[in-house]
Amino acid sequence: MEAPSSKKLCCTVCVHTVKSIPVIFILCILAWSYYAYVYHLCLSRVTSVEMSVPYLLVYHIILVLFLWSYFKTIFTEPSGAPPNFRLPEEVFEEFNRNPIDLSRQSAILRDFAENLPIMTFTNTNEHFFSDIRFCDKCKIVKPDRSHHCSVCRKCVLKMDHHCPWVNNCVSYSNYKYFILFLAYGLLMCIYVAATTVEYVIKFWDITTDMRIQDGSYKIHIIFLFFIASMFSLSLFSLLAYHIYLVSKNRTTLESFRPPKFLEGSDKNGFNLGCCRNIREVFGKEVLLWPFPIDTCLGDGVIYPLASDLKSNDSVRQSSNKSRTPFTV
């Protein structure tokens, strides 16, 4: 009996190790870049204290914010559906008794979801336009904007995508941290490239003495410049895309497949306007936006709709009324 359990443990360790390879790669690159920038550039190459101290101070501030955001993105557990979205065993057995009878299954889900805050419906079933979104793996009715992650093996609230570079789902729980991770990563790459480009140019200038000096540190600084420049391009494109998604209140999954409402598919169904969309992710306190702490609005289950906003704009006195979920 020990062999199977040992084998299972070994497989689990191997799987976790393989999943962690991208994270380990980033940390190794970061450790080498720290050595190259701090030792070879600031302590060895920059002889002026008036320059090296500000270089090191700004670099370490950005580094702390980057690592803080990165580890918060990695270690924040993706939020799952609340217990009231899970089908009781007897209801699930009834639902699963005759998988061919789609009409009966749809009726069971509609009855169960009658009092749940469900506003979106399945995009896959053409026979039942208003089918409730259901996950047979988790045995739950899916909350709006949630999806099942095959890597995390759970339904994740407001799932954006599963990112191998953080070995975690980017979702409602850590989306702000992920945006800050990209922003501080880009800022650090731009800063490193900007402060090393002067020395890279001097290394290639035949009129300076630096070209013929010992090249052990030159290789580190040159590689540091080119790696920072390449990462800047990739991080900029990724950050720009996610800023666009935040401004439109969409996830990556919703940009490829718009959510379906009672009236039909609508890619702007959750779009409340740029400012409100940003506050939904970063919160109302602008001074807290740069820090990877939890300031996002809502509970990850109920989201205001663009149609609700239009109604509230026309009837200001009812702005605080509770939204009644649609029932089929």
Image (cartoon, rainbow, N blue to C red):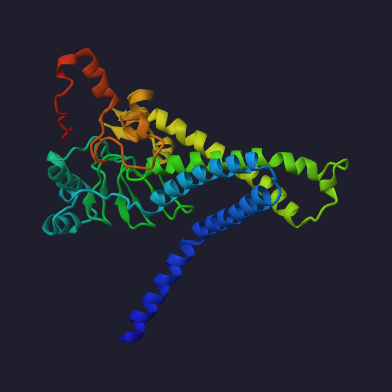
Q: Quadrant of residue 93?
A: bottom left
Q: Residue furthest top?
A: 314
Depth check: 66 or 26 in front? 66
Depth check: 187 or 272 in front? 187
Depth check: 248 or 141 in front? 248
Relative to 191, 255 lies left or right? left
Q: Quadrant of residue 179?
A: top left
At which x and y percent is residue 182? Answer: 49, 42
Instruction: Locate the C terminus by quadrant.
Output: top left
Placement of 259 over or under 134, stated as above or below:
above
Residue in the picture at 29% in, 24% down: 306
Q: Residue furthest front?
A: 49
Placement of 32 over or under 178, stated as above or below:
below
Is any part of residue 216 visible from this angle? yes
Residue in the picture at 31% in, 55% down: 154
At which x and y percent is residue 137? Answer: 28, 57
Placement of 11 over or under 33, stated as above or below:
below
Q: Residue furthest right?
A: 207
Residue in the picture at 43% in, 43% down: 178
Relative to 92, 295 lies left or right? right
